Amino acid sequence: MQEAQIIFNLPEFMQQWVLRERPEHQVEERHFELVQAPLPVPGDGQIVVQVLYLGLAPVMLRYMRNETSFERPLALGDVMHGRGVGRVVQSNHPDYQIGDVIQAKMGWREYALIDGNDPYFLVYKMNHTDLPLSHGISSLAMSGFTALIGMRDIGKVKSGDRVLVSGAAGGVGSQCAFIAKALGAGKVIGLAGGPQKCNYLISKMGYDIALDYKQEGMLEELDRQFPDGIDVFFDNVGGKLLDDVLARIRRKARVVICGRISEYLLDPAQYHAYRNIYRVGLQDAKMEAFFVYDYTAHFREYETTLAQWIREGRLQPTEHILRGIEKMPRALMNLYEGVNVGVMMVQVAN
């Protein structure tokens, strides 16, 4: 234990973000408070991790409102939930050695106390540390795993498939084209908002064509690009856009429901009423949602597959990185404002 203090020169105190108020609609910086706390001390079976990167996800608004069943409730004053990449600096657990790089639920803080025996934390070591450790938030973590599950295991992408992705410039969407093409897809088209993001889809994210959903005539352009219909639709947006695409699926299509960010800030009474859902049955298609944490038994295989594609140049992670733990609220707000391009994260430490 003393050796770890010398190697890492651990501080006596750390910074962490706590929940100050619950948002009713949009997230604002006033909902959080940055406070100082003593460095945690590990008990039996516990480790202390220096947080290197923290990821941001749209679901965090629901954490703040206690609207999920898969995350622990947040009381006012609790540290904000969040998954990150970190390095073990103290360990009282035989499976984790000082210096190991891990992914886990760490919370918005500079050092995390993690119980290595509690499955809640979803801890596993990063095997591919020759690659940038930031990939432990993007392609070699939940965003990459989600894209792979959706395209390969749910969407069943095969050679020649015509694929459409909504929210294509976001954390998951930024990886979908690379993965679809690695699986043999033909044309892959992405939907994003604004010319800058559309340019990124083609120049950085592997898409063949980018369509701006904010532009008039977008649906007519979809009809031109998919004259015979859409084989696979990977949806991160939901709402009216999903309804419009359902009108254009072809026989045996696969519709992958990953998210619905267009409705996250709406009251349920404002949710879109679908008119084209009947097309799923009419076209003998499949529409399926999924939850990435139901696939934890396969995470190691996902990590290895995606790491190999990165080394081969078939997958090129796009990461939007802010630096400094003080940027956490702004980074989350960026997600809902559509500012981010790629996987949104904050680098907490070198």
Image (cartoon, rainbow, N blue to C red):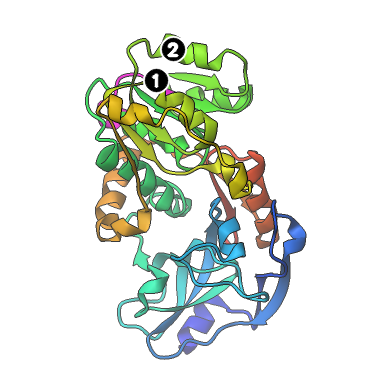
Answer whether labels 1 and 2 touch (C-beta < 8 Å).
Answer: yes
Q: How many marks?
A: 2
Residue at mark 2? 223
Q: Residue drawn at (36%, 59%), measured in percent from left and top?
A: 293
Label 1 CA crowd tier, 10 Å (few <14, some 14–19, many 20+): many
Residue 83 as seen in the image, left or right of residue 305: right
Q: Amino acid at mark 1?
A: Arg
The span picked out in magenta is 181-189
**Residue 316 visible at all:** no
Q: Residue drawn at (56%, 73%), measured in percent from left and top?
A: 111
Q: Secondary structure at mark 2?
A: helix
Tell whether position 340 is magenta. no
Residue at mark 1? 248
Which residue is farthest right?
A: 30
Q: Position of residue 157 (x, y in %)?
A: 26, 31
Q: Earlier in the sequence, mark 1 or mark 2?
A: 2
Which residue is farthest left?
A: 159
Residue 72 as seen in the image, left or right of residue 96: right
Q: Kindly identify which numbered label has been placed on residue 173.
A: none
Q: Secondary structure at mark 1?
A: loop
Q: Residue drawn at (45%, 66%), measured in percent from left and top?
A: 69
Q: Amino acid at mark 2?
A: Asp
Q: Position of residue 332 (x, y in %)?
A: 63, 52
**Residue 268 visible at all:** yes
Occupied quadrant, residue 175: top left
